[in-house]
Amino acid sequence: MQGNFTYHNPTKLVFGKDALDGLAAELAQYGPRVQLAYGGGSIKKTGLYDRVIAILREAGKEVFEDAGVMPNPTVEKLREGAAIARDNDVDLILAVGGGSVVDYAKAVGVSAHCEEDPWEKYYLRMEEPECRIVPVGCILTMAGTGSEMNGGAVITNHDSKLKIGHVFANPEVFPRFAILNPELTYTVPKYQMIAGIFDIMSHLMEQYFSGVDDSTSDYLMEGLMRSLVQASRAAVANPTDYEARSNIMWTATWALNTLVAKGKATDWEVHMIGQAIGAYTDATHGMTLSAVSPAYYRHIMPHGLEKFARFARTVWEVSVEGRTPEELAAAGIDALEAWMREIGCVMSVAELGVTDDMLEGIADATFIMEGGYKVLAREDVLSILRASK
Ligand code: NZQ
């Protein structure tokens, strides 16, 4: 391990079939005014909304509704939510939903008492909050983003065609608690479940394909990837397989709760391309990553050959017999691609609504990261997008 680091994760997790039973004890830590943030209505259909409202009422909370958080939450919705929090001086924001709702709640939490416009301050200038931060708790209904145990909050600005993630360093931005019941994910539509699964794989690969030293973090990620591949196959075959859904949920949390990045460089270029595609198309996040990943990894593979060969061996159990390092590395990406097709990932940007006239704009909207095996130029981004059509 080469890097110096401090590791501190303040989120308390309550996991399992009975996790919701832990909500009342968490609510007791906060004042009476609770902003209830949720999405487009899935929690009403599943009955979760009624269960949560009953627990809130039992706990004597006054509830301020904040419905309609859309997938890929927008800056307009963020401003609306910040006004609800500020005007009602809420003590806690309770996010009930997937990564979009949890990200949104964190962004609202840092914006409610901030004098400046949140888009300018947190997303264009990437500043940390100086104002009072409203605490966030969450009940997660979909696995993928890791938002339940990290400081990330991704917001989309359709006017400027930018989708930007701010990974807040301040531990007060992380959810204070996260209720994780894998059974709540049974009703996630198959397309969203697969997008979430690929989001997890992408988080792991973004952190794995970097660095040249022997790092415990890489071994942890290999284990998480193997578990994910196994669980994804079982969940696709049977969405109510508790073992599979619980492993997927747990893997998602560990893939992006900041642990496996410790002591090493990380890449994140696939997420930058995916976010730019999202800004142009509003496509489902995990599928924006899947559509470009095979082309991206084939593009950078010659610059990190040893790690790609190790990926083939350890994650996909590709035999080294009779293969050159180049052939082994390539076979690993072939195995990744075969698994993606098998579970039903989107494999082309065209399927997400990307048209030829968007490619230049998407390349312009792609932030360039410097931690991976190759620092891309704009032309590289364009050629990856063209190879992903
Ligand atoms: O809005 P509702 O009605 O709840 O429906 C949602 C939404 O339509 C539905 N859904 C969620 N749980 C469900 C369910 N439907 C039925 N039953 C359930 N139990 O699924 C749809 C997608 O939900 P969403 O929250 O958008 O998905 P996800 O968890 O993938 O979150 C995506 C957002 O997170 C950001 C993405 O960019 C995107 O904006 N990310 C956040 C990260 C972080 N904080 O670290 C990292 C990620 O890579 C990602 O960038």
Image (cartoon, rainbow, N blue to C red):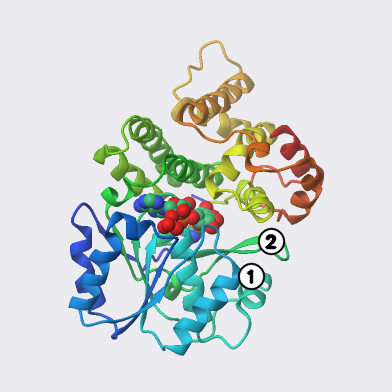
In the drawing, what numbered circle is on residue 123? 1
User: Does residue 377 appear to the left or right of 336 in the view shown?
Assistant: right
Q: Secondary structure at mark 1?
A: helix
Q: Secondary structure at mark 2?
A: strand
Residue 276 percent location from the top left of the image: 68, 53
The reply to whether discs 1 and 2 touch (Cβ–Cβ < 8 Å) is yes
Q: Amino acid at mark 2?
A: Leu
Figure quadrant of the C terminus: top right
Q: Tell me the quarter of the picture where residue 57 sits.
A: bottom left
Q: Which residue is mark 2?
A: 162
Question: Is residue 125 at least partly visible in the picture?
Answer: yes
* Nearest-to-viewer mark from 1 and 2: 2
Crowd around label 1: few <14 · some 14–19 · many ≥20 (10 Å):
many
User: Does residue 300 appear to the left or right of 307 in the view shown?
Assistant: right
Residue lying at 48% horizontally and 17% vertically, measured from the top left: 319
Question: Is residue 146 at least partly visible in the picture?
Answer: no
Report how far apart the C-alphas of labels 1 and 2 lie in the structure. 10 Å
Residue lying at 45% horizontally and 60% vertically, measured from the top left: 40
Residue 60 percent location from the top left of the image: 21, 82
Residue lying at 64% horizontally and 46% vertically, measured from the top left: 372
